[in-house]
Image: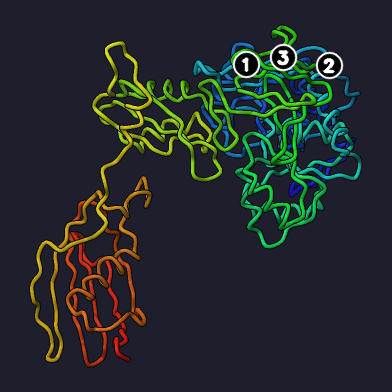
Amino acid sequence: MAVGERGCRTAADLEADALRVRALLSASPPGEVVLICADRYHFAAALLGAWAAGHRVRLPPNGQPEAVRSAAAGAEVRALLHDREDAPDGVFLPELLAGSPVGGELRLPSLDGRLVVMTTSGSTGQHQSHFKTGTQLVSEGELIGKMFAIGPGARVLATVPPHHIYGLLWGVLMPLRSGAAMVREGPLHAEAIAAELERWEVTHLVSVPAHLAPLALVDRARPLAAVFSAGAPLPFSAAQALSQRHGWRVIEVYGSTETGGVGWRNPGEEWTPFPDATVGADEEGRLLVDSPRLDPEAPRPCPVPDRVELREGGRFELLGRVDGVVKVAGKRVSLKEVEERLLAVPGVRDAAALAEPSPGLRGEEIWVAVAAAGQTPERLREALAGWLDPVALPRRIRVLEALPREATGKLSREKLRALFEAPPARTRLDPEAEETAEAPAGRQARRLTFTVWPDLVWFRGHFPELPVLPGVVQLDGLVMRQVDRIWPGAGTLRAVKRLKFSRLIRPGEKIVLWLEHDPARAMVAFAIDGPQGRCASGTLALQGRGS
């Protein structure tokens, strides 16, 4: 039923542990229980125990500390259950589940009630609560198991956390309803995922594009019956690579917290609706969905903030989002929420966010421009880190005196994006002064002075919070370039000996480069000094150009 590093568990173990949770929560009047777990077995035991105690389970929008605390502060919340060893608040589930057995029989309430509250980012910036009945969730878990022939004997590993609708359905409820075993842990990195697939004899992998694509580069991975991808479009090239390298069948899944599962496809094909779902489109091309997984109070058909093109046989093609919510590495991020979180930071007067296509597998990335006093990009990013998933943190932050808003208060996308267009970067280090230095007989020496300009191209992205001049640039763009200029016949580089980097070279510093050429030995000794002392040194072994 569950396998993993923390031990294997059976259905009987699950019932016993759910009873422990029920016993703890039964003393509280009916309300909500906030649940956040990395271990899927812990999550399942707490979910069933909370239901049996007459509570509804509230799942936070992400696992960040401030987001969890905010959810736990709700007026109806009776408890916070978690499996985080360093968390100061709430009930630590591993300790509770290690307690004495509790007698009784596990009785669940009617599944027709609203038993789970999912929290998502909305286009207004406020987190949106979506109520799900137990019937909706459990029946969908059962449906997807039947659709893809997952049953007893199967083992499912999910890299998606269970507080996410996709992770809850495919990583917890589907294994429970189909009789498959769930892997308790959810590794994120390719090598760790491949190792866990082999270790636990996994048959089905539930993941997202950002985790799947790197697996195509792993030398060897266990054969799988199927791999499921959701949360963001999976590049067709990545799906092909996974199929060709490992022989995996990749299946993309489409849905949302509001609608539950809507459709599936083989990569590169059109989408096929789930058997009990129908799709349509309004006059503006917005997707319309009807299925048993919609909130009973939702309009039918329900408009979804995705554009769609209908095809024959009920199939469809997705054309992208139509609102202010974007997908970053499969996670929903509200641009409005990012702006509001920034405006809550002391000193911030104005803020604007936009999403830009990412060159990697994140899909999109967030950029923000902020008008603030006494703030730095590093401090602003740290302030957001308590609320947003790490993948959703802004990749670029521009701090200004004011944002270029119009008289109406509007800020066009063109003006906002222009704030991030940096002037052309310097691509070379040129000496400001050069003089002959003393050297032993038969040798030549130079002393050169440089300013390490902050707009040098090598500082961009190396590293955003602590820019330093890379060692390879010091060696090639500084030392070798000057050796070739001063002594053009000295020869080509054969080896670097006694190379040592002692101190970082930061933007804006003044540095001195010392060069001493020994023609008889075909060597050049060098040293780079900065304001705090020696930064780098070594000896270049050269090979004559004619040899």
Of residue 489 and residue 60, the one placed in the foreground of this image is: 489
Q: Is residue 79 above or below residue 217?
A: above
Q: Quadrant of residue 205?
A: top right
The residue to which callout 3 is attached is 28
Task: Spot the residue most to the front.
Answer: 312
**Of label 2 and label 3, which has the lower sequence position?**
3
Residue type, numbered disc 1: Ser
Instruction: Read off the residue under disc 2.
Output: 111
Residue at (55% x, 24% y) in the render: 69
Could you tell which of marks 1 and 2 lies nearer the N-terminus? 2
Nearer-the-camera pick, 44 or 308: 308
Residue 138 appears at what percent x and percent y? Answer: 82, 24
Q: Is residue 191 left or right of residue 290?
A: left
Q: Is residue 48 above or below residue 206?
A: above
Q: Are marks 2 and 3 in contact (CB under 8 Å)?
A: no
Q: Amino acid at mark 2?
A: Leu
